[in-house]
Amino acid sequence: MTVEVDTPEGLMKGSSVIEVDTNVSGQLSIPTPGAVRARVRGEAVAVDLPNGRALFALLRSEDDVDFAKRIMFLMAPKGRDANGDPFLGRFNNMLEMTDPVELPATQAKINPSLAKMKAQPMLVTFGDLNDPTTVERVDPFNLQDSFGDGVSLRRITVQVTDDPVTKGIEKRFQWLGQIKGSGLTRDDFPENVPVGAFSEMFKKGD
């Protein structure tokens, strides 16, 4: 996933390789034949902006904690495989998406049944990277409100790659592995930022 931001100093971008390990149970599996299970390993996208600020595109969207697990599949064209299976047909189509695909604001056109759901990750920034309670929601349509005049989101894209999974976000957030035992409560964070499994919005897996 790649995030591109226009700034007075030019285009700034950041990307993250996120692994989604998908398994489909066989038709004779018990108790759920044909069940699809996916596991995510990776981290949020970070875009370093002027004046020392940074924008983060999370592993979740506003209304889907499993956004990173599903978005590539949802962006793939529908289809059926040789046996008429619609899931495998779409999954195979997804594997062919090696060129960048721009994420729309919502899923209205790509998945009409999910029209009201977001098709882009939630965006946040921090007043102080060393303090998780300074997290702030960022409006994708109004980045200048958070970062100043002339800063705007150009686009967010996804594509299939065989590059290694991105690592190292702990260097930005020293608290990432310690937040569960920190004693912080919901009241310590802004009301418009979900804090359930807070650290998993930034990193999942090993």
Image (tube, rainbow, N blue to C red):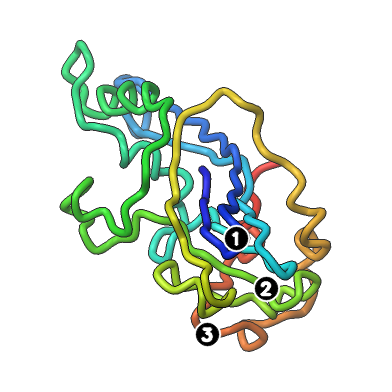
Identify the image quadrant of residue 80.
Answer: top left
Residue denoted by label 3: 191
Residue denoted by label 2: 126
What is the spatial separation of the Cα atoms under label 3 and label 1, in whole angstroms?
A: 18 Å
Q: Which residue of the protein is positioned furthest toward the top in this rendering? A: 82
Name the quadrant of the C terminus: top right
Q: Residue at x 50, y 71 (%)?
A: 143
Q: Earlier in the sequence, mark 1 or mark 2?
A: 1
- Disc 2 is placed on an element classified as strand
How far across and how far down the image is residue 121, in percent?
Answer: 46, 57
How far across and how far down the image is residue 55, in percent?
Answer: 61, 63
Left or right of 119 in this view: 81: left
Q: Earlier in the sequence, mark 3 or mark 1?
A: 1
Is the Cβ of the residue at disc 2 closer than 8 Å to that at disc 3?
A: no
Q: Residue at x 76, y 69 (%)?
A: 129
Identify the image quadrant of residue 185.
Answer: bottom right
